[in-house]
């Protein structure tokens, strides 16, 4: 294995901590809470995937259809700067957009690396599953994951200003996709693969 090879068995926890570090509120999270937050996010994604699988099966396209979430395939490039956008979710009205050119580029990169997307052929279901997590998470309203775990920003007497942790729903969405599709890797690895592709 060269240093450029991906470690497909990288721990979802380690990847989760990596994602948590990208959270704008990361400096406000007490060090002792970090690990538990990542665990809670991974667990939320997995258990929501199991419930979803029991109700609607494990095919993301069918789940979207059964839950009346339209899926749009766009030929646009939604990326900005060095950020690649593969898919996004809008809550009102619910809609998932897949950005096909970016996804095809990633699929080609994975095929070139011999990764074979671990027998799923394309990463479309992975991105669709990820966005479906955001849909189900949003339906919980104030109970959604990022609002369940907040950090204190400022306090005066009994008044507290808090902020949700947006990175938690990203960690959970990856765990949801991994569990739903029975992937041997946490999808955050796809980002790392792309970064390696750009470095070459
Ligand atoms: Zn997301």
Image (cartoon, grey):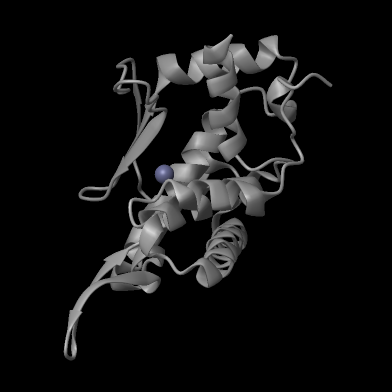
Residue 57 locus on image (x, y percent): 60, 51
Residue 67 locus on image (x, y percent): 40, 52
Asked if residue 157 is positioned above or below residue 5 in the image, the reply reads below
Residues 183 and 58: in front is 183
Q: Residue at x 77, y 41 (%)?
A: 9
- Name the residue at the right extreme: 1
Q: Locate residue 185: give its quadrant.
A: top right
Q: Residue at x 58, y 42 (%)?
A: 59
Q: Residue at x 33, y 68 (%)?
A: 147
Residues 71 and 29: in front is 29
Residues 196 and 70: in front is 196
Q: Residue at x 60, y 24 (%)?
A: 193
The quarter of the picture where the N terminus appears is top right
Residue 149 locus on image (x, y percent): 40, 71
Q: Locate residue 101: give its quadrant.
A: top left
In-image side of 4 versus 170 (left or right): right
In-image side of 74 versus 41 (left or right): left
């Amino acid at each position: 294995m060269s240093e450029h090879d991906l470690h497909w068995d990288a721990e979802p926890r380690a990847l989760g901590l990596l994602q948590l570090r990208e959270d704008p509120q990361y400096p406000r999270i007490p060090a002792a809470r970090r690990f538990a937050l990542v665990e809670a996010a991974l667990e939320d994604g997995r258990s929501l995937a199991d419930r979803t699988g029991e109700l609607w099966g494990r095919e993301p396209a069918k789940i979207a259809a059964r839950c009346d979430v339209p899926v749009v395939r766009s030929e646009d490039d939604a990326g900005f700067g060095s950020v690649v956008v593969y898919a996004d979710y809008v809550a009102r009205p619910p809609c998932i957009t897949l950005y096909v050119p970016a996804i095809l580029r990633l699929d080609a990169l994975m095929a070139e690396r011999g990764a074979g997307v671990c027998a799923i052929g394309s990463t479309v279901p992975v991105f669709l599953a990820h966005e479906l997590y955001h849909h189900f998470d949003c339906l919980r309203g104030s109970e959604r994951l990022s609002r369940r775990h907040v950090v204190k920003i400022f306090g005066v007497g009994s008044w507290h200003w808090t902020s949700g942790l947006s990175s938690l729903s990203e960690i959970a969405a990856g765990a949801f996709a991994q569990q739903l599709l029975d992937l041997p890797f946490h999808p955050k690895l796809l980002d790392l693969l792309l970064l390696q592709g750009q470095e070459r």
